[in-house]
Amino acid sequence: TVAYVGDGNNVALSMAQAVVLLGGHMVVVTPAGYELSGDDAVRLKELATLGGGSFTATNALDAVDGADAVATDAWVSMHHKDADARQK
């Protein structure tokens, strides 16, 4: 299992696509309101089925428990209008 913790940006999406297509299990943990798009999440679940892996998206940090690898990124990217307020 590979876990990603950060906002649902292009890094999260690209990593999830690679992992599930290779048959791995991917968990993406994001803050509420910063998830991957609904269309991206649906497509990742479809790709996981094709690749033999799985995809989970959640806001719960404990979802990384037991992961073999955890990658992190900014919890809220700077391009979000409310980034300063959310990081405090």
Image (spheres, grey):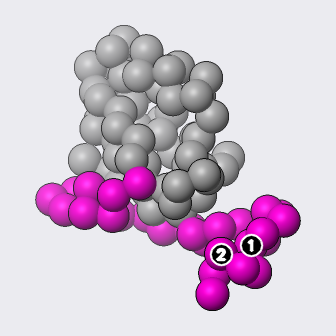
Q: Residue at x 25, y 63 (%)?
A: 62
Q: Give the residue type at disc 2.
A: Arg
Is 23 located above or below residue 56 in the figure? above
The verdict on residue 67 being magenta is yes
Is 40 located above or below residue 85 in the figure? above
Instruction: Report the span colored magenta.
Output: 59-88
The verdict on residue 76 being magenta is yes
Q: Is residue 80 left or right of residue 51?
A: right
Q: Residue furthest left?
A: 66
Q: Position of residue 14 (x, y in %)?
A: 59, 41
Q: Residue at x 64, y 81 (%)?
A: 87
> Label 1, on which residue?
83
Q: Residue at x 74, y 72 (%)?
A: 83
Q: Position of residue 8 (x, y in %)?
A: 59, 50
Give me the disc on residue 17. none
Is 76 located above or below residue 40 in the figure? below
Q: Give the residue type at disc 1.
A: Ala
Q: Residue at x 33, y 58 (%)?
A: 60
Q: Are marks 1 and 2 in contact (CB under 8 Å)?
A: yes
SS for dot 2 = helix
> Label 2, on which residue?
86
Q: On the image, which quarter does residue 49 sit in?
A: top left
Category of crowding for the residue at label 2, using alpha-carbon neighbours closer than 10 angstroms: few (below 14), some (14–19), many (at least 20): few
